[in-house]
Amino acid sequence: MKKILLIPLLFLAGCVTLDTVYPTPKKCLSNLELLEKWIEYDVENGLINEEIAADYLLIIRSTQIGLQKQKLKR
């Protein structure tokens, strides 16, 4: 569950300059895949409820689709 609190940090990792944050769709997709693996790990080990995990995974997959569409437009 602690990992889920790190979501904002994942989007900022490797995308920060001194003044501005520049997350790339590729980096965000990579971070979302990692977050998805963490959630699946937590479910397998009984650390979070399957219903809660399903909600998180739905949001992650929806975000991934949006980022992929954005990436195709460029």
Image (tube, helix red, strand yellow):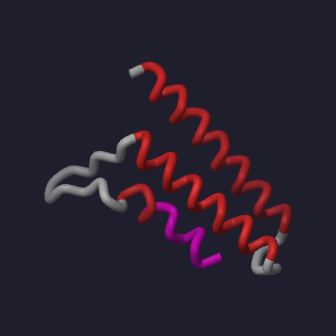
Q: Quadrant of residue 13?
A: bottom left
The residue drawn where x is 77% and y is 74% is 48
Q: Quadrant of residue 65?
A: top right
What range of the chain is rendered magenta? 1-8
Q: Is residue 60 left or right of residue 54?
A: left
Q: Residue furthest left?
A: 18
Q: Is residue 28 left or right of residue 52?
A: left
Depicted 36 relative to depicted 44: above or below: above
Residue 36: x and y in percent read: 65, 58
Q: Residue furthest top?
A: 73
Quadrant of the drawing holding the C terminus: top left
Q: Quadrant of residue 34?
A: bottom right
Q: Is residue 29 left or right of residue 19?
A: right
Quadrant of the drawing holding the N terminus: bottom right
The residue drawn where x is 42% and y is 65% is 9
Residue 38: x and y in percent read: 64, 68
Main secondary structure along the magenta-highlighted residues: helix
Q: Is residue 40 magenta?
A: no
Q: How many marks?
A: 0
The residue drawn where x is 54% and y is 26% is 69
Depicted 12 relative to depicted 73: above or below: below
Residue 64: x and y in percent read: 59, 41
Q: Is residue 5 left or right of residue 13?
A: right
